[in-house]
Amino acid sequence: MNESRSVKKESDKLDIILKARQVSKKYPGTLALNQVDFNVYRGKVNVLVGENGAGKSTLMKIIAGAIEITSGKLLLEDEEIVIRNVDDAAKYGIGIVYQELNLFPNLNIAENIFMAREIRSKGPLIDHQEQILRTKALMKQLEQAIDPKELVSNLRIGQQQIVEIAKALSQDVNILIMDEPSSALSSAEVSILFKMINELKARGVSIIYISHRLEELIQIGDYITVLRDGKLEAEAEIKNIDVQWIVEKMVGESAEKKINHTNKAQDKEVLNVENVCLSRQGGGFTVDHVSISLKAGEIVGLYGLMGAGRSELFDCLMGLEAEAKGTIILDGQDISKSSVVQRIQKGMALIPEDRQREGLIQVMSVTDNMTLSSLWAYLKGFHILAKKVKASVEKCINDISIKVSSPQVVVSSLSGGNQQKVVIGKALLTSPKVLLMDEPGRGIDVGAKTDVFKIMNDLAEKGLGILFVTTELKEILSISDRIIVMSKGKITGEFDRQEATEEILVNASAIGHKLETPLAG
């Protein structure tokens, strides 16, 4: 902590637009923030890092007015301010891009961007045309060819993240908080995001940037603050530190935890997919005659650019796409015509990419969430066997190391990493033979991500076949026995663990794309 104190003294000489001093936030039974000091340097990218549960999002929600401070103070331009709600924060020029999407799926992009800030024509009417024009300008700034009239429900998650960013940009802010803005973006979209951030810096906007992608923090950041267990751990200039320094300050280790991966694949084929395809509206295929084989105990990674059709393939395998065609054999049984419930009961389980909207019900307890997909296993007549539920949930919590004070707490009170483990637990309670995992490491810190990969390894050792999607090259190379690459709905490459390299995977994923355009499918 001596290092952070010396940097703090030096920071007093620098231009700081916002200061948090001795900020604490208490919840019943939990001290989320413990007397934290935090500096926001004017016109700089102020990186904030820490493991899940370290207090990052809590601190940002206090600054953005989403929750109230318990003790401590905020100073804007050295004047103490009180922020009770988001309107107060907006009055002081503070905006936020939340980690979890905060959009209305039944409204179009323009309506979402100007929600509660509608542009008025003469009288009480909304000037929809002006909102569409401004949205077009924002999409052009973000280099996205998306129609402002498109319903948000029709957008893939990466495009929804772009809408969240555009919503923040549409406001006149001096301080912009970005909580995991790149977690659902392709590498091309991240480059555009960084270009936009540099433009905002040039205009004097101060950025607070949270991400678990440590390499990108080194690339985009100017200053870094590390939180650990709700306390300030360190502060430094990015130019003076490296990724190893960040990991050490976050988790108290000099290097990232490693997974000792060994191939546990058996001879038994547990999944055989033949010529699965899903037609695209307007012609062509979103999933274009894909064939995949998966063995018991095998971990197969699916890599590709955004829009490659990987998530859509998972939807086809789970029976979520009624128009899908092809043959799906699960553990010797043809499930091509089976319903979603029947596929779950026969041994197929999905960990969705968007855990907030598709994986969890935020107002329900951990227990209720974990048993949602397997209630049929706990029924006797019309009654739920409460003791059996309790025993199964507690065993699962222990097996996959979910940090929770009680299985009865509301799931929204857990950190992102532990929420992800709850989604995994929900799938495991269905006793699956094949586990489909869509971006299992998205939006969680290095420690939680390592835990998830260990769970995957342990499950493979027990004979589960695992098919997982990720856009992170290091992830897919470290955990996969075999890697399949998709581009524009087709399989464009298949590689054993020993032969796969980052260059090979990137080249295979770019097949069918014009190189002069951003590689976002």
Image (cartoon, rainbow, N blue to C red):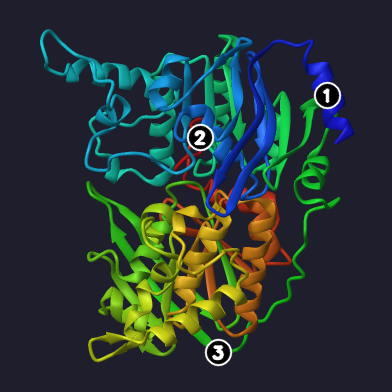
Q: Which residue is the site of mark 1?
A: 7
Direction from residue 278 to residue 487 in the image, left or right:
right
Q: Which residue is the site of mark 2?
A: 61
Q: Amino acid at mark 1?
A: Val
Q: CA distance from mark 3 to mark 1?
A: 58 Å
Q: Quadrant of the C terminus?
A: top left
Q: Amino acid at mark 3?
A: Lys
Say which label, 1 or 2, has the lower sequence index: 1
Q: Nearer the viewer, residue 215 or 36?
A: 36
Q: Which residue is the site of mark 3?
A: 268
Q: Nearer the viewer, residue 141 or 64?
A: 64
Residue 150 numbered tag: none
Q: Quadrant of the N terminus?
A: top right
Q: x, y (%) of residue 192?
A: 53, 28
Q: Residue at x 25, y 21 (%)?
A: 132
Q: Nearer the viewer, mark 3 or mark 1?
A: 1
Disc 2, SS:
helix
Establish if 150 lies above or below 507. above
Q: CA distance from mark 1 to mark 2?
A: 25 Å
Establish if 145 lies above or below 497. above
Disc 3, SS:
loop
